[in-house]
Image (cartoon, grey):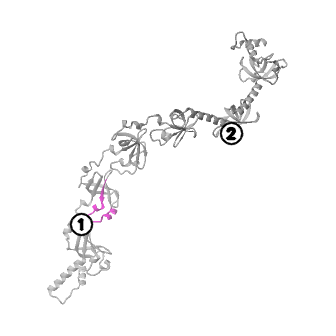
Amino acid sequence: MENDTLETRDAVKTEIPAGETVEEQFNMEQIQDLSSFEEGKIIEGMIVASTPDSVFVDIGYKSEGEIPKAEFKQEPVQGEKIHVMIMRMENREGRLVLSKQKADDILKWGEVRQSFTDNIPVEGRIVETVKGGYRVMVEGSFPAFLPGSQAAMRRVMEPKDFVGKTMLFKIDKIEGKSNIVLSHRKYLEELRERKINEFFSTRKVGDTIDGVVKDIVSYGAFVDLGSIDGLLHTNDISWGRVQDPRKHLDKGEEIQCKILSMDDESRKVSLGLKQLVPDPWESFEDRYEKGGRNRGTVTKLTNFGAFVELEEGIEGLLHVSELSWTKRINHPKEVLKEGESVEVMILDYNLEKKTVSLGLKQVLANPWDDIDTRYPVGSRVKTKVARVTKFGLFLEIEEGIDGLLHFDDISWTKQGKSMGDKYKKGDSLEISVLSIDKENRRISLGLKQLQENPWKSLKEKHPRGSVVSGTVTSIVDFGVFVQVDEDIEGLIHISQLSTERVEDPHDFCKVGDELKAVVLDIDEKKKKVTLSVKEHLTHLEQKEITKYLEKGDSNKSVTLGDLIDMEKLGK
């Protein structure tokens, strides 16, 4: 064996001065008094040989020490220096007995205690879960307890996932080898703190930095910058409108951002994505002009209009009033939908405010431009009732173009307000075009104008002072209405019913009675005919008196009551 040992030593290749062997160099380094060797002492030695069962170490003693090879976790290397403990100065065979494992345990324990004192992390492997946490082997030799709350920064959902992992820990408490309490969380917190400090000391506003989208919220996204999270606000994702950050970013996506602001006190970092590309408004006039036609995408509909994106970062307002020349649009959703591609005209823009006014109707022909050619004044047009109002009917001449038929232009004879109940939406009417106001987009229509005005012939037929005969159509407190012509009624005021005082018109006549009265006035504009029975009786009285006087029948007297009765009897 001794020959094997010598051969092994000769095989060790180390860089040594010429003429010296490995043992000689090692002995020179380890020269010491033999009295310093004692059992239980830890000393440094050098591996000089190994067999399948043992490893031989030279510690400068008179003989080499032997260590069971089982104490080595890795294959021993000749020439390697290791620490060993002297177990026996001589065994039965007279050989020095050493232990690497004992030396390692003592040295490691010292290192563990020193790590606790110096607040230095130690390495450990989680071997199993126990009540309230985990059992950890520190430095492969010392059992320790890791509370569940100290295993990570956040709550651990699956504790078994940590078993088998090797991590760095801070020692919270140490009271002997069997009572060690660890914290991986404190290690992570201190590591994070160091990285954050390093971030703020090495980074500055304006720097471009890589990150990973960690979480997406309604107002933006949090980006993991490696040591700290930065906020990428919705307004800084794109030059265009960003309604939902999820349409622009994906969780876990790697992105490049620009640092917009840093606050080392509050540990806040603001990021920008759009700042990496030029602002499209800076070159707006190179691509767009007033009156120009461009295609865009409808991005949002509101009560007052629609927003149309001409390109990313350039969005204009299409007001509801600019949607149609003819239709009354209450909400843009009646003609547009989000995501739709439309052609629009640029009406105006403001580079300072970054606003664009758009028009949709301007890219279409204006039907009002030649409305007077298609519907000249005096022409007859077939229409439908679009809606009924308190002052007249709006009639649809064609899709999107309505004209007004005022109640006063429906009938020559009947009162306008009473005409509203006669018509409903959808009714067909043929009317006459009375006037067209292209500037204000108004058309006046008439129905009665298609018929002859009966008031003109009424004046000729029944001049003032003539006597008319008519049927009582209604009786009111202030008088009696009598039909004097087709669709035309005249009013006999209560004061004109008789030469005598009438308290109640109902006592004078009833509906259906025939009465004769004198025409006092015909007002074509107000559509009023004023009659008087009193005036007729007065004329009749004078006529009868004259007649009787001419006959000389002076003995027979005729009273006014007789005349009234004669009139009622039609005599």
Mark 1 surroundings within 10 Å by alpha-carbon count, few (fewer than 14), some (14 through 19), many (20 or more): some
- Res. 165 visible in picture: no
Left or right position of 124 against 343: right
Mark 2 surroundings within 10 Å by alpha-carbon count, few (fewer than 14), some (14 through 19), many (20 or more): some
Callout 2: helix, strand or loop?
A: helix
Residue under label 1, please give it. 524
Residue most extreme to the right: 92
Label 1–label 2 contact, CB within 8 A: no
Image coords of residue 337 (percent x, y): 41, 45
Could you tell me which residue is drawn at 20 percent across and 80 percent down? 540
Say which quarter of the image contains residue 106: top right
Residue most extreme to the bottom: 555
Residue 148's mark? 2
Please state the extent of the stretch shown in magenta in the rendering: 402-422
Left or right position of 308 against 473: right
State whether residue 61 is above or below residue 338: above
Residue most extreme to the top: 19
